[in-house]
């Protein structure tokens, strides 16, 4: 992408932008792109400056197709927080021009409007139940007029600080005990309290368009979706009875992961059809999802440079130190409980294959560049290669909650290079 000789920033219309994005990337395999990138970095003398990502546009396409084949009645709203890389989002829009976006802050709304100021505002949701007044005003002034709430106080805020156009979805509490990152500990109203929110909305003239839920990021137990759909049904009945007009949106949140998607999609599809089938098929209810990791995780491979090695005294292990770690792009290990599997790449950019039966394995631990002992990427890994300073280590599935939360701790950069490929 970066080598395509075209510039997005010079375009000022949506059509022009989509045309520019469609420029073909130069590589079709992640391995070739890594090899080429490493040769270029070597030529420039920049191998250890920062790590780099390879993003596979083909994977965005495949994940979107998988979504459409399993849940064709649910419109995806990409959760920008998951990976706000603008080139990634532009590519997503070029594949799915009517893509929706879940923005949780002013900066995320700004990102989407910068990419496409012409975006149909129905494709945006300000999905954060607690909003700073200044950011709520910004959304309202920019015609982003659908938001989630889970408290009476937020209804008052909307009534007092917006122009009457801001509509709401009530976010309900879910059972997210199986999730990698539970969210209901912080957000969501139970049915009893939701009734009070409904009353407040009616009293202050804030229109409720429907219900939202999130069963937790990276959830494992798909049955929690059933309860969330059933609770949504109950709340929608209450809203419609009290408000006098129909709800027209159900937001089923995110949390889906590639590995378990088919199973969770089946459970969600069945329950939605059971509870809302008629309203969905006659177009009365639009169903949306704030999917993050499902779309972005598998699109990115991270490659970092080995900046040093050291034998552990008496330990039989070698410590390998990288130019990226838990305070940088691999913060997903800490915050997102991600387990990463290192791929060894030589200083010449060649993959080193790991034969499971090899007797030649050496024991390693892998560390980030900061001075903190917490900055450990892997405590123990066996590899059949003698890793040296200047080699590289790659990590697949690094597109979700990685760079988005990277810090500059210890003065190490949280910037990164990236290349787009299409496999
Ligand atoms: N929507 C909301 C409100 C969230 O808090 C999150 C993640 O924290 C998401 C969507 C995206 O979730 P995921 O990346 O697990 O799909």
Image: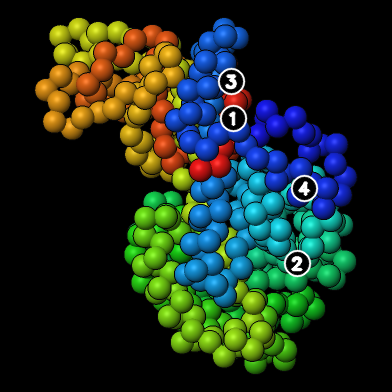
N-term-proximal mark, 4 vs 1: 4
Instruction: Give whichever of discs 2 and 3 has the lower sequence position.
Output: 2
Residue 42, x across and y down, in percent: 53, 10
Q: CA distance from mark 4 to mark 2?
A: 23 Å
* Quarter occupied by residue 235: bottom right
Q: Secondary structure at mark 4?
A: helix
Disc sitting over residue 122 in the figure: 2
Determine crowd level at label 1: few under 14, some 14-19, many 20+ residues with C-alpha closer than 10 A: some
Task: Mark 1 and ligand 1: say if the CB distance to the nearest ligand atom is below 8 Å.
Answer: no
Q: Single out the mark in the foreground, 3 or 1.
A: 1
Percent of width and height locating residue 279 = 60, 88
Query: Residue at horizontal 17%, vertical 21%?
Result: 361
Inter-mark Cα distance, 4 to 3: 33 Å
Pinpoint residue 121: horizontal percent, then vertical percent.
79, 63
Give the SS element for disc 3: loop
Q: Do the residues bearing badges 2 and 1 touch, measured as CB atoms within 8 Å? A: no
Which mark sits nearer the N-terminus, 4 or 2? 4
Q: Secondary structure at mark 2?
A: helix
First of labels 3, 1 by sequence position: 3
Count up the numbered dots: 4
> Is residue 114 found left or right of 364 in the rendered image?
right
Name the residue that disc number 1 marks: 418
Asked whether mark 3 lies closer than 8 Å to ligand 1, one says: no
Reading the image, the residue beneath label 4 is: 19
Quick one: label 4 or label 3, which is nearer the N terminus? 4
Kindly report which numbered mark, 2 or 3, lies closer to the viewer in this rendering.
2
- Image height of 7 relative to 83, above or below: above
On the image, numbered disc 3 is attached to which residue?
413
Residue 67 x %, y %: 51, 64
């Amino acid at each position: 992408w970066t080598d395509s000789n075209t510039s997005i920033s010079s375009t000022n219309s949506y059509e022009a932008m989509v045309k520019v994005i469609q420029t073909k990337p130069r590589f079709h395999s992640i391995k070739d792109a890594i090899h080429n990138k490493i040769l270029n970095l070597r030529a420039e003398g920049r191998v250890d400056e920062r790590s780099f990502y390879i993003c596979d546009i083909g994977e965005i396409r495949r994940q979107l197709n998988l979504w459409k084949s399993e849940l064709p009645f649910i419109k995806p709203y990409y959760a920008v927080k998951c990976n706000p890389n603008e080139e990634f989002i532009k590519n997503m829009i070029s594949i799915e021009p009517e893509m929706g976006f879940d923005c949780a802050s002013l900066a995320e709304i700004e990102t989407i409007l910068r990419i496409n100021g012409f975006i149909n505002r129905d494709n945006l949701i300000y999905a954060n139940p607690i909003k700073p007044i200044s950011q709520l005003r910004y959304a309202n002034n920019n015609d982003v007029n659908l938001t989630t709430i889970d408290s009476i106080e937020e209804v008052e805020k909307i009534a007092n600080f917006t122009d009457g156009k801001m509509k709401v979805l009530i976010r309900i509490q879910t059972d997210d005990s199986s999730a990698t990152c539970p969210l209901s500990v912080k957000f969501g109203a139970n049915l009893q309290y939701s009734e009070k929110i409904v009353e407040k909305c009616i009293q202050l003239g804030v229109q409720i368009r429907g219900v939202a839920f999130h069963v937790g990021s990276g959830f494992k137990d798909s049955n929690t979706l059933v309860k969330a759909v059933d609770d949504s049904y109950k709340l929608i009945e209450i809203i419609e009875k009290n408000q006098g007009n129909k709800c027209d949106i159900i937001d089923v949140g995110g949390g889906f992961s590639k590995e378990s998607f088919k199973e969770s999609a089946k459970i969600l599809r069945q329950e939605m059809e059971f509870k809302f089938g008629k309203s969905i098929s006659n177009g009365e209810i639009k169903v949306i999802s704030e999917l993050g990791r499902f779309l972005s995780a598998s699109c990115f491979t991270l490659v970092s440079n080995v900046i040093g090695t050291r034998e552990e005294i008496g330990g039989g292990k070698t410590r390998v130190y990288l130019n990226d770690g838990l305070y940088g792009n691999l913060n997903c290990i800490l915050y997102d409980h991600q387990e990463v599997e290192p791929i060894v790449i030589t200083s010449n950019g060649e993959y080193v294959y790991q034969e499971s039966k090899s007797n030649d394995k050496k024991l390693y631990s892998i560390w980030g560049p900061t001075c903190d002992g917490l900055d450990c990427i892997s405590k123990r890994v066996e590899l059949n290669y003698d890793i040296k300073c200047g080699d590289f280590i790659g990590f697949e599935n690094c597109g979700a909650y990685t760079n988005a939360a990277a810090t500059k701790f210890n003065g190490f950069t949280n910037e990164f290079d990236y290349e787009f490929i299409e496999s």
